[in-house]
Image (cartoon, rainbow, N blue to C red):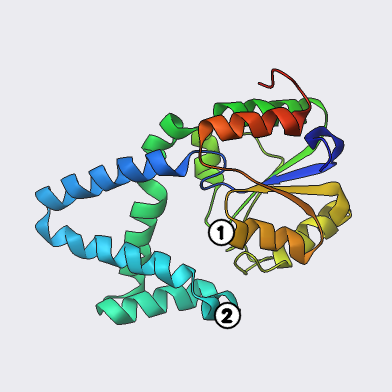
Amino acid sequence: MKNIYEYKCVTFDMDGTLYYQFPLRILMIINMILYCILHPFGIKEIFIVRYFRKIRENENLLKNKNFKTAQYELVAGKFKISQEETKNIVNLWLIKKPLKYLIYTKDKKLAKIIDTLHKKKIIVIVYSDYPADEKAKVLNIKADYIYSSEDKNIMSLKPDPKALKYISKNLNLNFKDILIVGDRYEKDAKLAKSCRADFIILPQSRMKRKRLYRRLTGETNAV
């Protein structure tokens, strides 16, 4: 594995990569419990979100060219609600509500590495299966480009290589010039492997990440 600063472009996943997933989930579980205490019928929303996340892992959905519509159709059909209501509930719990907690779970060491990448004129990209613009703003992560699997030029979920192929073509880069940084082997690593690009899968342990960053940056006292 090369030093991270030897690449022309570094592409970061968002969820579980630029922030720690476990503490955010704990905060969201507490939020959901309090919500259900105050709104007993709100438990249905929790089941809707859980089912939506399960659908997102379905291999048949990964192959569906119209997955953005299909995912809401499947959930709406199961719970007998409109697609619009489904979309609003999912957006509330998976995008809007987590925003106020993100800053507390930010990977500050990785953020400093990203700042160094900018200083060295290395292209920084955030690519997530979910919309990441608002999350990047809250985390104060500056990226040259932010992509989502739901973007009209991509419309495919990880580990489908379509997004990486689009990024490399758009920026006129070879796959060997791109490093993929993520937290899930079955998503981020497989995405990189499909294009023979290098990748790093970050552990959720802060101490393990710290040791990894030292190796990745070639610094004995990395960030």
Classify 82 as above or below 27.
below
Depicted 143 relative to depicted 62: above or below: above
**What residue would you read off at disc 2?**
64
Residue 129, which numbered label?
1
x and y, in percent, of residue 51 in the image = 35, 69
Camera-side residue of 172 and 53? 53
Quarter of the image for the N terminus: give it.
top right
- Which part of the image, by quadrant, shows the C terminus? top right
Picture quadrant of residue 217: top right
- Regarding residue 165, the answer to whether it shows in the image is yes
Q: Is residue 140 in sight in this rendering?
A: no
For residue 98, side relative to residue 64 (left or right):
left
Q: Position of residue 111 (x, y in %)?
A: 61, 30
Query: Would residue 199 appear left or right of 13 to someone viewing this image?
Result: right
Give the CA separation, mark 2 to mark 1. 14 Å
**Left or right: residue 143 compared with residue 71:** right
Disc 1 residue type (three-letter) = Asp
SS for dot 1 = loop
Q: Residues within 10 Å of mark 2 (few under 14, many from 20)?
A: some
Of the pair 193 and 162, the residue shown nearer to us? 193
Residue type at mark 2: give it: Asn
